Image (cartoon, rainbow, N blue to C red):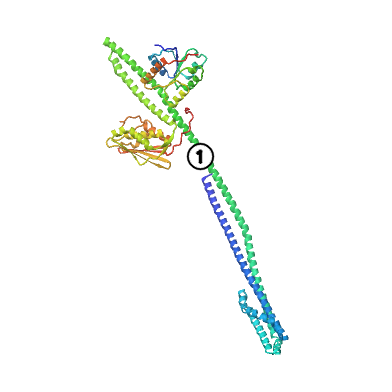
């Protein structure tokens, strides 16, 4: 089964293990979209806003907040400040479950906030459900 | 300034104070003496004026008496010479007042301070003169005019009159002398007083000046001391503020550290657990493959491989899993503590009894199971504090009290409280199994527990309670005896100040 749109999933995640587990579980949920994994904030900003930015394909951002070189919130702000990127759904997927952090992310325009459960069964289930969600949501096409 | 120097200064100040006081006392004594002298002088002057008046009156009386005597004599002589009754008139007019004035004279002179001798002689002479005049006039009336005239010619009357005059003059001289002496005395007293005032007034002025200068200096010193105290106070406050700020910063750093560490610890934990699960899933596939291989050819699978797949690997995975789960709980505890330290307090007016009642309801099942009672003795003090924090503090303490009751006796948990000096003290007393004295401080540390580890828990509750209580500006202590029970004593400010200032690095709410 393939997603209805050729949406690129941009995964900004510094922990390779997490990235691998997320990818595995997305696949298990039947999400076979292209996943671009970026392991640092700098790499992410470079990919999203740098000179070689992908102009054509619609995208969905999976964002971790605890990055070594910057806060994921900074990236969220930059995405929502950008005229084109701001339409892309942003799903914050992070270990932080601080209420103020969550509130802040929604205020800044994140679409979904998911706390990574430490318990793997829950984690896997959350990612799989996210996959189901990704399979049905509509992402605006690139302008 | 050294302590000795300060002491010396204090001593010299005290000496100065004593000197000032002595000078003032002297000044006032002088002033008082001067005032007394003045009063005395006024009194003297009045006495003087009175005596001068009486002396003058006396002198006047004397002159009048003399005049009357002369009038009487003139009348006597005129009548004797002419024989005409009209000439006798001055005599007749002078005689009654003369006779009235004479008897008092001696007493009046004595009263005026004179001697009795002269006036007595004067009165004697005057009476003799009157007697002489009366005798001659008596003879004339009897028709013996010549005999009367002969008597007059005899010169007794004239001699008497001359004596009277001399005596009168002597009396006048004496009274004049008395007057002069009095005036002299008064003058002397006045002069003495003037002299005294002349010396005293500059002295007084000096004392006044000295006192003013000393007082002014003293005031200036007090002013300087107050300024110094104010400066010292300000410095102290600044220092306290500085320390408080650095303490708050350090505290904030620890909070952030705990927060970050717990998050960063969680991330690898997700991997450990995730890949453990992956391993378990893979193990399942492996086990199936092994079973199929064994079914095909039992010789293919040795006991070591079977042992590994059936026992060793599942056991290892089980330990990894239970350890990571425990680690997750510990991290969650650290996170909760750090979050508690960052939460903004919202103090409100609270009646602790209401909170206790709510907690008691939630503990009802455990209380009943342990056949325990929870009572509030008296009234708990009204508090203005953070509701959630107080709920958690009391909740944890009561939860512990129930959890560590001694099954050997019916549980009895008592709450009591009182307000004192702006602080509330709330005691939670139980008759549970008690805490070893060695552990009284330790139990408030994170992940530390006491006694037999037969109850669930991570050693987080009391650490959490202490964090909360300290955040509210209070403290907690424990006193307990093993096998008897424990008392946890929480002291809180009656009014917890409103939200702490936002610290740098706080996410914007």
* Res A113 → quadrant: top left
* Res B56 → quadrant: bottom right
Residue B135, horizontal then vertical, whole percent: 66, 87
Horizontal side of residue B168 vs B211, given as left or right: right
- Measuring 72% from the left and 84% from the top, which residue is drawn there? B78
| Mark 1 closeness class: few <14, some 14–19, many ≥20 residues within 10 Å | few
**Chain letter for mark 1:** B
Q: As displayed, is residue B437 above or below residue A57?
A: below
Horizontal side of residue B189 vs B426, given as left or right: right
Q: As displayed, is residue A85 above or below residue B238?
A: above
Q: Is residue B434 visible?
A: yes
Horizontal side of residue B82 vs B50, given as left or right: right
Can you say which quadrant of the picture contains the N terminus of chain A?
Answer: top left
- Measuring 60% from the left and 74% from the top, which residue is drawn there? B111
Q: Which residue is mark 1?
A: B236
Residue B408, horizontal then vertical, whole percent: 27, 36
Judging depth in this view, the residue of B228 and A53 nearest the camera is A53
Q: Is residue B174 visible?
A: no
Residue A20, horizontal then vertical, whole percent: 40, 16
Q: Secondary structure at mark 1?
A: helix
* Res B369 → quadrant: top left
Residue B27, horizontal then vertical, whole percent: 58, 57
Instruction: Tell me how many marks there are.
Output: 1
Give the residue furthest to the right: B82
């Amino acid at each position: 089964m393939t997603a209805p749109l050729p949406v690129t999933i941009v995964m900004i995640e510094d922990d390779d293990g997490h990235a691998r587990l997320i990818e595995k579980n997305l696949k298990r949920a039947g999400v076979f979209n292209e996943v671009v994994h970026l392991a640092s904030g700098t790499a992410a900003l470079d990919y999203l806003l740098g000179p070689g930015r992908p102009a054509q394909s619609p995208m969905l951002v999976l964002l971790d907040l605890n990055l070594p070189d910057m806060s994921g919130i900074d990236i969220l702000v930059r995405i929502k400040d950008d005229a084109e990127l701001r339409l892309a759904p942003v799903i914050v997927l992070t270990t932080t479950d601080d209420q103020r952090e969550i509130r802040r992310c929604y205020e800044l325009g994140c679409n979904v906030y998911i706390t990574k459960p430490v318990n793997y069964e829950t984690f896997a289930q959350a990612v799989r459900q996210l996959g189901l969600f990704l399979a049905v949501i509509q992402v605006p096409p690139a302008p | 300034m050294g302590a000795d120097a300060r002491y010396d200064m204090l001593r010299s100040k005290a000496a100065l104070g004593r000197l000032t006081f002595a000078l003032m006392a002297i000044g006032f004594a002088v002033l008082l003496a001067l005032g007394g002298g003045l009063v005395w002088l006024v009194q003297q002057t009045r006495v003087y004026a009175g005596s001068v008046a009486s002396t003058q009156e006396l002198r006047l009386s004397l002159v009048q008496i003399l005049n009357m005597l002369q009038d009487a004599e003139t009348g006597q002589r005129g009548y004797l010479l002419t024989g005409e009754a009209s000439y006798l008139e001055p005599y007749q007019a002078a005689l009654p007042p003369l006779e009235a004035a004479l008897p008092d004279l001696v007493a009046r002179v004595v009263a005026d301070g004179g001697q009795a001798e002269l006036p007595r002689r004067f009165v004697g002479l005057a009476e003799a003169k009157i007697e002489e005049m009366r005798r001659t006039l008596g003879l004339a009336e009897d028709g013996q005019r010549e005999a009367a005239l002969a008597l007059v010619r005899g010169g007794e009357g004239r001699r008497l009159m001359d004596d009277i005059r001399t005596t009168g003059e002597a009396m006048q001289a004496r009274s004049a002398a008395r007057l002069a002496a009095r005036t002299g005395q008064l003058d002397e007293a006045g002069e003495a007083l003037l002299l005294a005032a002349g010396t005293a007034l500059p002295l007084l002025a000096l004392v006044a000046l000295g006192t003013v200068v000393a007082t002014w200096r003293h005031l200036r010193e007090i002013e300087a001391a107050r300024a110094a105290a104010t400066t010292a106070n300000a410095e102290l406050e600044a220092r306290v503020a500085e320390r408080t700020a650095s303490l708050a910063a350090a505290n904030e750093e620890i909070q952030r550290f705990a927060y970050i560490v717990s998050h960063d610890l969680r991330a690898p934990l997700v991997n450990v657990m995730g890949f453990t699960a992956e391993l378990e899933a893979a193990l399942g596939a492996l086990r199936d493959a092994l079973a199929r291989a064994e079914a095909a050819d039992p010789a293919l699978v040795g006991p070591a491989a079977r042992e590994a797949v059936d026992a060793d690997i599942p056991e290892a995975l089980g330990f990894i899993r239970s350890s990571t789960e425990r680690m997750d709980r510990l991290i969650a505890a650290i996170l909760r503590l750090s979050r508690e330290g960052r939460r903004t307090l919202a103090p409100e007016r609270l009646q602790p009894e209401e909170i206790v009642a709510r907690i008691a309801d939630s503990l009802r099942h455990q209380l009943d199971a342990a056949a325990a009672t929870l009572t509030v003795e008296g009234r708990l003090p009204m508090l203005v504090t953070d509701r959630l924090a107080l709920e958690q503090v009391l909740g944890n303490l009561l939860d512990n009290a129930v959890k560590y009751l001694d099954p050997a006796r019916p549980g009895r948990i008592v709450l009591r409280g009182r307000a004192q000096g702006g602080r509330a003290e709330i005691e939670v007393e139980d008759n549970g199994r008690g805490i070893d004295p060695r552990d009284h401080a330790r139990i408030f540390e994170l992940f530390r527990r006491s006694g037999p580890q037969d109850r669930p828990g991570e050693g987080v509750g009391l650490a959490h309670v202490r964090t909360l209580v300290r955040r509210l500006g209070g403290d907690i202590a424990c006193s307990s005896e093993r096998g008897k029970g424990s008392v946890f004593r929480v002291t809180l400010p009656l009014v917890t100040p409103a939200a702490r200032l936002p610290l740098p690095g706080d996410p914007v709410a």
